[in-house]
Structure formats: C-alpha cells, structure tokens
Image: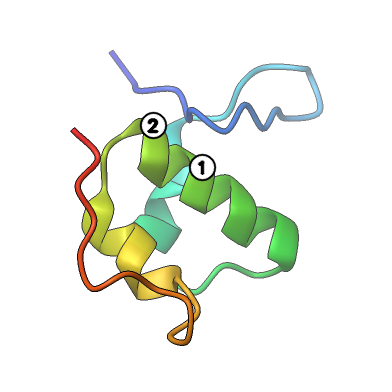
Amino acid sequence: MPVLCPCGRTNGKGQTLKLDVCCGPSHSGTPAPDAESLMRSRYSAFVLLDEQYLLRTWHPDKAPAELELG
C-alpha cells in the first residue's frame, strides 16, 4: 500500500499525493523547487522523524548540533 505524504498536498482531484512523488524526492536529495515545497518537506520529515533531513535543510547559523525527535 502506498504511503501518503504527511504534508497533505493534493492533486487536481483533491487526492493526497504519495510520499514518493511529493516530499520523498527532497528527502532523497533532490532540492525542493520552492519555499512552500521546502517547508512541506521539512514538516513531513518531522512527522517521519527524519532528523538528518531536517538538519541538512536547517540554516547553518541556526541549526542545532544534533536533533532528537523520538
């Protein structure tokens, strides 16, 4: 069963997008195309407890040395 993206983004039919086509590519290293996508991908990473992605996308001047979500 496909995993739905936690960010809640929907397609033109109002269906929630799958993680692998929504925020998943950003989590895998593809840069987010815009600010909204970056923030959605960071929210999804928080929900999925992806500490490494959050640290990679945090502004270096504000990033904590480490992060423990769960």
Is residue 20 in view? no
Note whether 49 is above or below 67 in the view shown: above
Q: Residue furthest bottom?
A: 61
- State the residue at coordinates (78%, 19%): 13
Is residue 59 in view? yes
Dot 2 lies on which element? helix
- State the residue at coordinates (71%, 68%): 34
Question: Where on the picture, by quarter, is residue 53?
Answer: bottom left
Q: Nearer the viewer, residue 67 or 18?
A: 67
Q: Nearer the viewer, residue 63 or 32?
A: 63
Give percent across and percent down for residue 19: 42, 36
Figure quadrant of the C terminus: top left
Check contact, mark 1 vs mark 2: CB within 8 A: yes
| Residue that badge 2 annotates | 47
- State the residue at coordinates (48%, 30%): 5
The numbered mark at residue 1 is none
State the separation of the CA atoms marked 1 and 2. Answer: 6 Å
Label 2 Cα crowd, 10 Å radius (few <14 / some 14-19 / many 20+):
few
Instruction: Tell me which amino acid carries mark 1.
Output: Tyr
- State the residue at coordinates (39%, 40%): 46
Question: Where on the picture, by quarter, is residue 47?
Answer: top left
Give percent across and percent down for residue 9: 67, 32
Give percent across and percent down for residue 69: 24, 40
Dot 1 lies on which element? helix
| Residue that badge 1 annotates | 43
Q: Nearer the viewer, residue 60 or 56?
A: 60
Instruction: Tell me which amino acid carries mark 2.
Output: Val
| Relative to 68, 21 lies left or right | right
Give percent across and percent down for residue 20: 39, 42
Note whether 13 is above or below 23 in the view shown: above
Q: Residue furthest right?
A: 12
